Image (cartoon, rainbow, N blue to C red):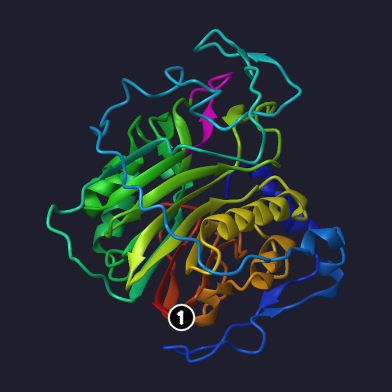
């Protein structure tokens, strides 16, 4: 979820929302309407937030650039703040506030001319894939999406990801709130340890550097993609609109909301994957809808009609929110919903997490509940190329 203020939504959204799903798997066709619209809620956001034009045509070839063949760091002695350049390694921090960081001694944020939105290099990439890999891949793909709540229960999360019947058999994992070297997870590189346990390739992108201004956290947090198939063409998109976390008294941070993305082979296609975590401190989706549109801009530029999958924590308080509606309008389908599961995914009783797919048929899927190692439930879905 990311930010306690999001709970204000529960008091403000006094009109109940509901999303009606279709039962049964495999799913031959989508139901007429997965999301039961609510005119009162739909009228609150600016009408422009619902508008987006998908204008590209044809398939944009995958870059095919492999993950860097470099030693994978396994401790927290290097590459962690303040051993980072916040004008290169982290998304630009936009804030009117100025603060002195007690760890680096720097006055922050640094002057940073980079425009937003912008794509930057991923923070870490590596592979624990077995050396012998197939020369061809199935047309099906099992996807897991899960907000790990800062990997504060890292050992238990690794255990469930490697043993649970639905989660342990996934091909790709789209994860958010993955901490690197913070006190919340025992000062460990969570993405590195999870990828090793899953025997997967992985990429990790910093969303926020957790500044230690009047608190003891350290390290950074972000998104991760794990894959049991090779990953190529990875990048990190820094969004242009978000809550000013740098000025926050409770959670001072450097960085921006991000979307982490890469290509994975499915059948004879290179499928673009996105791990997302939209703004939590945004009551009616004004910021989140901009983030979704920027994600779609990237999707048009890098893949267009190639199959694509977007998964993660959307922080959308109801199914008709504009940040979700622009995805529907661009041809993405609510994959877990089409599998018959539209139940809440957060322990506050709201459905905040989704997997959206374009160019796929939904075979099966579900929500794994009862996992007391995060405030979010895990999603899984089986997809097949159309």
Quadrant of image for the C terminus? bottom left
Q: Is residue 218 magenta?
A: no
Where residue 274 appears, as percent x and y from the top left, is: 49, 56
Above or below for 78 versus 31: above
Q: What are the residue bounds of the magenta stretch? A: 206-216
| Picture residue at 31% right of the left edge, 47% below the top | 66
Q: Nearer the viewer, residue 337 or 54?
A: 54
Above or below for 245 versus 284: above
Quarter of image, res 115: top right
Q: Is residue 180 left or right of residue 130?
A: right
| Picture residue at 43% right of the left edge, 88% below the top | 25
Q: Which residue is mark 1?
A: 362
Q: How many marks?
A: 1
Q: Nearer the viewer, residue 52 or 310?
A: 52
Q: Residues within 10 Å of mark 1 (few under 14, many from 20)?
A: many
Where residue 214 appears, as percent x and y from the top left, is: 59, 19
| Picture residue at 56% right of the left edge, 23% below the top | 87
Where residue 381 appears, as percent x and y from the top left, is: 42, 73
Above or below for 225 versus 324: above
**Residue projecting furthest to the top:** 105
Element type where label 1 sits in the image: strand
Q: Would residue 163 be visible to someone looking at this image?
A: yes
């Amino acid at each position: 979820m990311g930010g306690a203020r999001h709970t204000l939504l529960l008091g403000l959204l006094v009109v109940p929302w509901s999303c009606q799903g279709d039962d049964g798997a495999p799913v031959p066709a989508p139901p007429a309407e997965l999301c039961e619209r609510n005119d009162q809620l739909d009228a609150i956001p600016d009408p422009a937030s619902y508008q987006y034009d998908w204008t590209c045509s044809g398939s944009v070839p995958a870059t095919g650039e492999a993950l860097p063949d470099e030693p994978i760091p396994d401790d927290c002695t290097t590459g962690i703040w303040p051993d980072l350049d916040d004008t290169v390694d982290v998304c630009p921090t936009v804030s009117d506030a100025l603060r002195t960081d007690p760890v680096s001694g720097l006055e922050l944020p640094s002057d940073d001319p980079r425009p937003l939105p912008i794509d930057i290099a991923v923070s870490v990439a590596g592979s624990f894939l077995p050396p012998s890999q197939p020369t061809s891949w199935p047309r099906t793909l099992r996807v897991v999406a899960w907000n790990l709540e800062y990997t504060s229960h890292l050992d238990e999360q690794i255990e469930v990801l490697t043993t649970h019947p639905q989660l342990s058999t996934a091909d790709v994992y789209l994860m958010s709130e993955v901490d690197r070297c913070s006190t919340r997870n025992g000062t460990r590189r969570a993405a590195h340890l999870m990828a090793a346990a899953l025997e997967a390739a992985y990429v990790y992108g910093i969303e926020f550097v957790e500044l230690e201004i009047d608190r003891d956290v350290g390290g950074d947090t972000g998104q991760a993609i794990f894959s049991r198939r090779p990953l190529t063409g990875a990048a990190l998109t820094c969004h242009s609109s978000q809550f000013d976390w740098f000025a926050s008294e409770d959670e001072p941070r450097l960085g921006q909301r991000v979307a982490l993305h890469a290509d994975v082979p499915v059948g004879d296609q290179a499928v673009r994957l996105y791990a997302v975590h939209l703004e939590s401190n945004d009551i009616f989706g004004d910021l989140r809808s901009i983030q979704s549109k920027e994600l779609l801009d990237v999707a048009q530029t890098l893949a267009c009609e190639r199959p694509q999958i977007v998964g993660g924590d959307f922080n959308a308080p109801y199914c008709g929110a504009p940040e979700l509606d622009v995805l529907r309008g661009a041809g993405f389908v609510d994959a877990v919903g089409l599998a018959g599961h539209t139940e809440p995914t957060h322990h506050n009783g709201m459905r905040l997490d989704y997997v959206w797919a374009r160019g796929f048929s939904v075979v099966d899927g579900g929500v794994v509940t009862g996992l007391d190692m995060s405030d979010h439930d895990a999603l899984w879905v089986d997809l097949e190329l159309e």
